[in-house]
């Protein structure tokens, strides 16, 4: 898995992970019913530009459901 371009050293990566963990804990304190993995994943995605997030979502959806071919496809009403 490729690390974000701005994370260049192990020390920077550790600081980023520490900040992420603190953010996850704050969200979970406010919303204890939330799934920690989903919170972590969402916070990571929110650091990416919107078009990159969209592209990744489309790729993931395509991998899970196959290409959208029209009638009868679960992603197309």
Image (cartoon, rainbow, N blue to C red):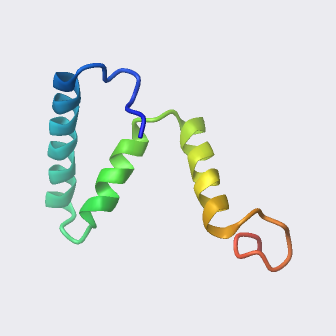
The answer to whether residue 50 is above or below residue 43 is above
Q: Residue 36's image quarter?
A: bottom left
Q: Quadrant of the C terminus?
A: bottom right
The answer to whether residue 61 is above or below residue 48 is below
> Residue 46 or 6: which is nearer the viewer?
6
Q: Residue at x 41, y 23 (%)?
A: 5
Q: Residue 62's image quarter?
A: bottom right
- In the displayed structure, does residue 72 sit left or right of residue 42? right
Q: Quadrant of the N terminus?
A: top left
Q: Residue at x 66, y 69 (%)?
A: 65
> Residue 35 or 3: which is nearer the viewer?
3
Give how far across and how far down residue 53 sits, in percent. 54, 43
Give how far across and how far down residue 42 sits, in percent. 38, 51
Give how far across and how far down residue 72 sits, in percent. 81, 80
**Residue furthest toward the bottom?**
72
Report the label total.
Answer: 0
**Residue furthest toward the front?**
1
Give how far across and how far down residue 60 sits, in percent. 58, 56
> Residue 5 or 42: which is nearer the viewer?
5
- In the displayed structure, does residue 42 sit left or right of residue 69? left
- In the displayed structure, does residue 41 sit left or right of residue 28? right
Q: Residue at x 77, y 75 (%)?
A: 73
């Amino acid at each position: 898995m490729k690390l974000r371009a701005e994370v260049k050293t192990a020390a920077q990566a550790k600081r980023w992970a520490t900040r992420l963990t603190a953010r996850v804990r704050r969200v979970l304190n406010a919303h204890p019913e939330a799934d920690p993995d989903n919170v972590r994943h969402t916070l990571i995605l929110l650091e990416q530009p919107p078009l990159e997030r969209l592209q990744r979502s489309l790729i993931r959806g395509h991998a899970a459901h196959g290409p959208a071919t029209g009638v009868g496809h679960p992603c197309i009403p």
